[in-house]
Amino acid sequence: MRDLKHIIEFEDLLQEAHNDLVRQARESGRRALGYTCYFMPEVLLDLPGCFSVRLRAPRSGSPDMATYYMSNRTCLYGRCLLERALEGGFNFLDAQMATETCTVTCRFQEHLQLMDIIQNPDFFCEFTDVPFKKNVNAIDHFEKQLQCHVLDKLKEHFGIDTSDEALLKAIEEHNEVCRLIQEIGSYRKKDVPTITGTEFSIIQLVTQVCPKYLIIDKLRDIAEDLKTREPDVKPGYRIKVVLTGSEEDDPDFIRLIEECGALVVADRYCYGSIPGREEIVVKEGETPLRAIARHYIETSMCPRFMEQHTMRERKQFLADVAREYKADGIIVCQMKFCEYWSYERTIDTLILPRDYGFPVCSIEKEYVNNAVGQLRTRFQAFVESVEIKKLQGGAAK
Amino acid sequence: MKIKEMGGKLRARAGAMRDKLSEKPDVRKMARDFWYGKPHEERRLGDLYIGDTGLYKHREWRGVVDTMYYFNMIWLYNYIHMVTDVMKYGGGPVMGPVNLVKGLMRYRWMGQPYLTVMHWFDRGLEGMRGPILRGSAWHYRGMTSETIRQFMEMFASDKKLNGGKESEQWKHNIAHNETVSGSIFYGFHDVLEDIPLEMIPYFVTCHVNNHTVLNYIDAAQSIGLPSDPCPMCQAEYGLFVLDDYPDYAPTMITSNEACDGSVATSVLQDWFLNRPLYAMPQPMRYDDPLVQEHCQREIEGAWKFIEEQYGVKFDWDMYCKYAEEQNKLTAFEHEKWDVAANTPYYPINGVAQALYRIYYSQDGNRPIWHEIDAHVRKIMNNTVKNKIVTLPKTRHRAIAWSCAPLYYSNWCTWAYNCWGINCVINMDSLMFDQYLRTDTYEHALEDLAWYNEKAPMRAMAVGGHEHILSLWSYMERFNCDMVIMYDQLQCKGMQGIHGVFEDEFRKRDIHAIWVPHALPDKRTVSRKEIRKIISDYMITVMREEPLDPTLVDFEDDSSW
Amino acid sequence: MKKILLKILGIAAFIYGLLFAVFYFDLDGKFLYYIFEPAMIKHFDNMKREDNTTMPYEMKENVSRE
């Protein structure tokens, strides 16, 4: 397929957290607000006068200083973020809007509070409590938390307009990004997709780490470009897969899977778009903040949710995604030391083939993917096994 | 050459024996040792062990009074009660033993550890004399009795032991995660029986006989779980993989206490239990006044769930009655802390303090705890009144921080005997530190929410770094000069703040010994390695001599 | 009567002495460690167990969602 518009530029933007667009936005006087978790509604951080940056630590090596602080038995994502912060790579942040949603990222953010790491006199780190359920009580609670720990703090520290009007405008802009991403992502549902998983992950990541107002035109261009993009005559993949699992912000990892013959057609992981890029709907009689709180609680598929029906619906959801995107299999991928996903991966690996008939490749990976030989072998073997099953299925028919 | 060498050795040995025999026996000293027991430095407790089994060549002679106390009031008394409690809680002299045997033969966690209970006493009470022997032993007795009550309740209603029958008792039991506090169920206390699901099969057995838990950890990993998540959580669901959980209740209540692993465990447990489940999470940022209402609603949600599932009503008077009873236990705990913090007359050793506190406060109000507290109060009043120093060889007063190795919770008994380290208090003793008001429903709910937010481990480990760093104020409060820093290798929360502690220890010039461990899994860090780490620190950094050199290096890998 | 009493006392003293020997020489521990526990381990290792991974996993009714 021909190169997508802006894709090289986008990939370039992902090479560091403090990228050109972040610089540009800050130079124009906007405040950079860091966050790590989907539960921190980015729409609130994209209010006029500020912009959200979902933290990544691209091109990380060995996080030695962070390993001193967090030991080598915590997830490398948290450690690499701390290392990057200690190196000064996050000094552009004006605030970190934190959540205690998984232990290690929480500890990383606590280090930002505890130690004088971010060299920015205005910097502060504020935590929001996130509920574990999807009931009305949880939404009430989350709404209060967002008001107090996000909106009030932004107003207090940076004079951000947090009125309903401002929120509605932010929702509108956010929804446009979501619509575009959904449109771009929908080309993955085709029998022969016209966008690769790697390309999509680059685009999706850019929407999370760059000021949206500076990329929206480019997203429109990409959506336009895709309308006429034709697939290769001989597709370069052998099977289609859904990638699900824990934190994943490295397009090279998706590239690795695709190099092994498995096209990633759906991204159901932290930093992915399913869920993540659904439009926020403000229901009648609902305040915009209430709508935002409800949206993030209802749409999230995080294994942190512990109600019985929610736990069970997650598997159904994943199977539905796989069907919708015409996937042949599912790769369940867990960051080493991520407790939520180590359990979720275990049950997904057993339930999805048994109850939904999807072959599953279950892997554990690091944040920094240096030695990928073993993973490559696993993916190649998975592709082959799915192909054989398909052949056998065809023969049986 | 070899024969010559052997001959030389034999001659040397014979010479030494001759010298020993020719020494005049100090009869007065022998009599004194017989009557009072040997002085601490001469006990040579390490010589009593048989290989690495943890068994004794003979049990320790503690002097006539303490040995006879141990024999009569601890060993015999508790063995007898292990039978009478079975009858008392198990439905009489026939059904009790019958159900016990069924349980013994059905569940590994029961069959292997139950009869080894007295050796759990032995390990925790080694070297103890006088009031601290008595006070600590009463604590052990309380835990044993409550354990028997719980498993007899389980067995009597267990579908697996009763031909799949859903008995009336089964229909009136609530299973809950061991980290859900018993206080939640006070409003149903007289009509329903709340029994923590993993407390006996996992938590208690780890302490008594840690051989069994290894099976559950391995089983957990056998279905694909990696080895790095908290092994406590692994073992808790490994029970299900091995089909070794008792089926004694129609519903389950779970919580997010204490960590990510605990939440994630619920996913697998829910699958294997496959019955109605209510999740009752507590907020993470619990200091925030805004989170309290949310937590209160979740507790009310749990009550509503119970009402719906069991067709019973939450009884406010019943709640008040048991909450007030529990307040009495809390009041006495505060008295105990006061004595522990400010005097050397505290008659409970480190392991008894830690285990009893976590057990009863988690379990909630039960008659046995009041009975035990009455015994201990009497002993403590006596030690305080008569200024009896209970651990006279104390060189250091230590606070143990973070979560303890379950397979070696008795390390503090060893540390005192070997090095004079007196572990005065530990982190998990300090949770649930509050009274439950009963003047109004609103106050009650407020307190209950707050109480459960400050549950074991989570009180210090979540909700902000200031909680875990409260160590410094507790050190001061309990007059400690040393920290035993538990380093649970798979606890992400504690690992995630490791370096900050290192920095602070240096800055504050605090002697801290990091004790790595893997909670229930002795294979990761053995007890011997734990002892070596402490001994190395005492020798190389503190430059101290052991009180009992036979305890510095010995094997106990195969012990219970 | 006195004789019987004495006899009972004698038997009790003997049992008491025997129990003390069991206690002092840790015979209970040795029995449990070398005989009882290995037998129990053998029993549990050979026990037939349900495969719980066959447990159904579907949505459940009758569960409070509030």
Image: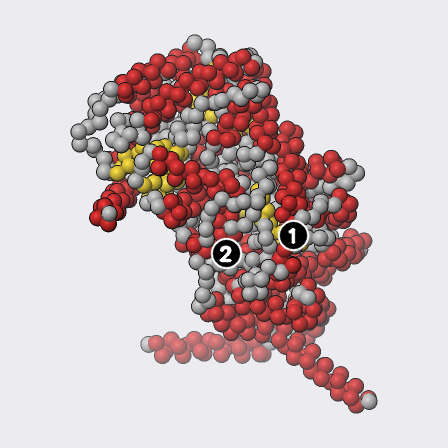
Q: Chain of mark 1?
A: B
Q: Which mark is residue B239?
A: 2
Question: What residue lies at 25% left-to-right and 31% top-to-bottom?
Answer: A192
Q: Is residue C20 visible?
A: yes
Residue A324 image offset from top left, x and y in percent: 35, 34
Question: What residue lies at 47% left-to-right and 46% top-to-bottom?
Answer: C58
Question: What residue lies at 66% left-to-right and 72% top-to-bottom?
Answer: B94
Q: Is residue B212 above or below residue B58?
A: above
Q: Is residue A394 above or below residue A14?
A: below
Is circle 2 on the same chain as circle 1? yes
Residue B341 image offset from top left, x and y in percent: 70, 45
- The image quadrant that residue C46 belongs to is bottom left
- Which residue type carries mark 1? Asp
Q: Which residue is mark 1?
A: B194
The one nearer the camera, B431 or B542, is B431
Q: In the image as oriented, which residue stretches furthest toward the top?
A: A28
Q: Secondary structure at mark 1?
A: strand
Residue B428 image offset from top left, x and y in percent: 62, 46
Task: Decide which of tag 2 and tag 1 comes sooner along the chain.
Answer: 1
